[in-house]
């Protein structure tokens, strides 16, 4: 499907520059969700049709990252997926993370291992023979910095270090594959534009063999009542029982994304990000997230409030203004923000 035609399915109010916080849904997703809510209100259906959207979502996410659906686990949050992965770490393990990493990809490791930190662009050289796993965002939440993926994978291979990626700020605008990764987790409520409550994980077979399904439940098992405990095959053994309504809207959204050319979305988002950067006096960048030092205008929080009064919804992270641009963002949104800043 052509991106210009697809963009008509979104109805953002002017000035939404905060997809890094949460993404907006396309109309077909809202229509399906309204239908499901009406069914719920009247009790006019079994839950099975809602559950079918879980299967569709798993398949669509697998297609998006080019992995077998068997290797995809479903959860409600990225951090819960990381907590499950942490069961693969033996006592005494060391996990290396960027020093500005979002805590959903830090705290689960801190509960299970010793955490080492390094600057995001020095991660590869900080991997040592003692590093059990390196866990990092493909795109940093606070700054939009893109991980030096090839270098990290090469260094990790040299030391048999597990490579674990957080794709929450990447999937949906940046081409993402599982090449060289042992695991990936993605909260789907940002660039994948799904409701909060849907999260996806890729778990490689070699990693799964070391993990324990400590959140076992009726959905990850094969039976609804009593013993014995039997796990479903593949990554499904690590599923949480799904938040149905999140997947009712996730399935059509992910299927729509798969009909689009990701290269078009990538080009659209970067063009807008670079329009903003040029207007704000920054050199061109390679990320759909832009972090701007606004000290000349006041603190980040003051600038955020000023933008809000001008009708721009952005975020403040690490004391800086953070703006983010997705397929439904337009040049007029960018210009609104630039006007407010000048
Ligand atoms: C990089 C990253 N990972 C994960 C999350 C969300 O984590 P969770 O799904 O555990 O709430 C965010 C939210 O901002 C994020 O920026």
Image: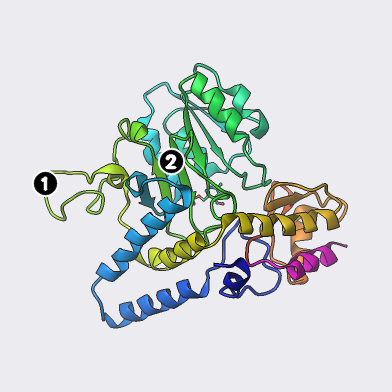
Viewer-nearest residue: 251 or 44: 251
Q: Which residue is mark 1?
A: 227
Question: Disc 1 vs disc 2: Cβ atoms closer than 8 Å?
Answer: no
Q: Looking at the figure, which quarter contains the C terminus?
A: bottom right
Q: Read off the residue under disc 2.
A: 82
Disc 2 residue crowd, few under 14, some 14–19, many 20+, Cα 10 Å: many
Is residue 341 in sight in this rendering?
Answer: yes
339 part of magenta stretch: yes
Q: Decide: few, some or many residues near mark 1? Use Cα within 10 Å; few <14, some 14-19, many ≥20.
A: few
| Dot placed on the residue nearer the N-terminal end, 1 or 2 | 2
Among the 4 quarters of the image, the one containing residue 205: top left
Magenta stretch contains residue 288: no
Q: What is the magenta segment's predominant secondary structure?
A: helix
Where does residue 10 sit, x and y in percent of width and height? Answer: 58, 73
At mark 2, the secondary structure is helix
Q: In front: 36, or 68?
A: 68
Where does residue 170 sit, x and y in percent of width and height? 57, 49
Seen at 58% across and 32% down, the residue is 150
Q: What separation in Å lies between label 1 and label 2 (alpha carbons)?
A: 27 Å
Rendering coords of residue 45 (x, y %): 25, 77
Q: Is residue 135 above or below residue 312?
A: above
CB of mark 2 near ligand 1 (< 8 Å): yes
Identify which residue is drawn at 45% across, 63% down. 255
Who's the residue at 61% across and 54% down the image? 263
Does residue 195 appear in the picture of this structure? Answer: no
**Magenta-tinted stretch:** 328-342
């Amino acid at each position: 499907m052509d991106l210009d035609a697809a963009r008509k399915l979104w109805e953002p109010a002017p000035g939404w520059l905060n997809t890094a916080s949460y993404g907006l849904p396309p109309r077909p997703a809202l229509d399906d969700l309204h239908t499901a809510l009406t069914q719920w209100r009247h009790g006019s259906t079994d839950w099975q049709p809602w559950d079918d959207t879980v299967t569709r979502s798993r398949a669509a996410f697998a297609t998006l990252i080019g992995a077998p659906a068997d290797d995809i686990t479903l959860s409600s949050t990225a951090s819960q997926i990381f907590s499950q992965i942490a069961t693969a770490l033996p006592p005494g393990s060391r996990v290396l993370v960027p020093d500005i990493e979002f805590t959903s990809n830090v705290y689960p490791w801190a509960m299970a291992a010793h955490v080492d930190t390094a600057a995001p662009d020095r991660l590869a050289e900080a991997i040592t023979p003692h590093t059990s796993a390196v866990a990092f965002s493909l795109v940093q939440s606070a700054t939009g910095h893109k991980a030096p993926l090839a270098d990290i994978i090469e260094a990790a291979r040299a030391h048999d270090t597990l490579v674990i990626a957080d794709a929450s700020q990447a999937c949906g605008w940046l081409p993402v594959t599982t090449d060289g990764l042992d695991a990936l987790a993605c909260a789907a409520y940002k660039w994948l534009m799904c409701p909060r409550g849907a999260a996806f994980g890729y778990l490689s077979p070699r990693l799964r063999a070391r993990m324990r399904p400590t959140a076992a439940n009726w959905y990850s098992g094969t039976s609804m009542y009593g013993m014995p405990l039997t796990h479903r095959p593949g990554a499904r053994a690590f599923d949480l029982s799904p938040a149905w309504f999140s997947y009712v809207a996730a399935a059509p959204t992910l299927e729509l994304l798969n009909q689009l050319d990701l290269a078009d979305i990538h080009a659209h988002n970067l063009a807008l990000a670079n329009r903003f950067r040029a207007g704000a006096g920054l050199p061109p960048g390679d990320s759909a997230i832009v972090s701007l030092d606004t000290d000349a205008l006041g603190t980040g929080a003051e600038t955020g409030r000023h933008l809000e009064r001008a009708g721009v919804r952005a975020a403040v992270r690490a004391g800086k203004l953070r703006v983010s641009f997705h397929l439904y963002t337009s040049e007029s949104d960018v210009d609104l923000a630039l006007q407010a800043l000048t």
